[in-house]
Amino acid sequence: MRLAFITSNPGKVEEAQIYLSSFGVEVYQLRVEYPEIQADSLEEVAEYGVKWLAERIAGPFFLDDSGLFIPALKCFPGVYSAYVYKTLGVNGILKLMNGVGDRRAYFKSIIAYWDGDLHIFEGRVDGIITEEPKGSGGFGFDPIFRPSGFDRTFAEMTTGEKNRISHRGRALQGFATWLKENLK
Ligand code: IMP
C-alpha cells in the first residue's frame, strides 16, 4: 500500500520510508502546510493538524509531530522545537546548556494516522546533550543528541541504526504493527 506522509521535512520521510518499506508500505511525501498550534503537548498539536487536514484532503495520511525535551531547561524546547531549531539552532541549545551539569534530554515523536478515524502512536528515546556537535547525518538536533547506551550521536549513525532506537523509530514500530493487524 502507498501512504502519504504530510511533512515538509525530508529527513522524517527518509526515516519512515526505510522503516515502513520492510512492512510492504510505500511512503511518499505530501507537502501540505497545516497549522501547528501552540499547545502544551505534541499530541494536541498533532491532533489539531490531522483534523484540519482531514477537512481538506482525502485520507489516509499521517503526520509526525516531534520535539526535543531538556529537563534542566524545564523541558524546553519541547513543543517549540521546530521554531527553536530555525531561530537558535544547535549552537543556541549548546549555549543554553553552558555550565549546566544535568545534560539529560529526550526526544518524543507522535505519529498521527488518519483513515477516517484518528490513530496515535508515540515513541521516546532518552539520552544526553553533547558538549559539541558531532556527525553529519540526520537532521535537526541529531548532531548534539547521544542516545543512552551509545557513544555516538544520532548524526553519526545511519538512518537504519537511528530508526532502531529513536523516538520516531519506536512510534513507527507501533504504527507498523497496527497497520499489519488492521490492513489484512
Ligand atoms: P515538527 O515535528 O515539525 O514540529 O519539528 C520538530 C523539530 O524537532 C524539528 O524541526 C527538529 O528540529 C526537532 N526534531 C524532531 N525529531 C528530530 C530528530 O529525529 N532528530 C533531530 N531533531 C529532531
Image (cartoon, grey):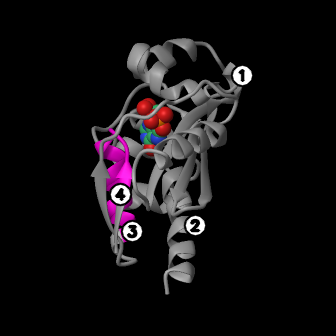
- Of badges 1 and 4, nearer the viewer stands 4
Instruction: Name the disc covering residue 4, or none.
Output: 4
Q: How many numbered markers are drawn? A: 4
Mark closest to the chain's N terminus, 1 or 3: 3
- Of badges 1 and 3, nearer the viewer stands 3
Q: Do the numbered discs 2 and 1 sit on residues whose CB atoms are within 8 Å?
A: no
- Residue in the foreground of this view, choosing between 61 and 16: 61
What residue is shown with label 2?
174
**What type of secondary structure mainly makes up the magenta span?**
helix
What residue is shown with label 1?
74
How many residues crowd around disc 1 within 10 Å: few (fewer than 14), some, or many (20 or more)? Answer: few
- Residue in the foreground of this view, choosing between 126 and 174: 174
Magenta extent: 5-20
Per the model, the C-alpha gap separating discs 1 and 3 is: 34 Å
Q: Amino acid at mark 3?
A: Leu
Per the model, the C-alpha gap separating discs 3 and 2 is: 11 Å
Q: Amino acid at mark 2?
A: Gly
87 versus 177 height, above or below = above
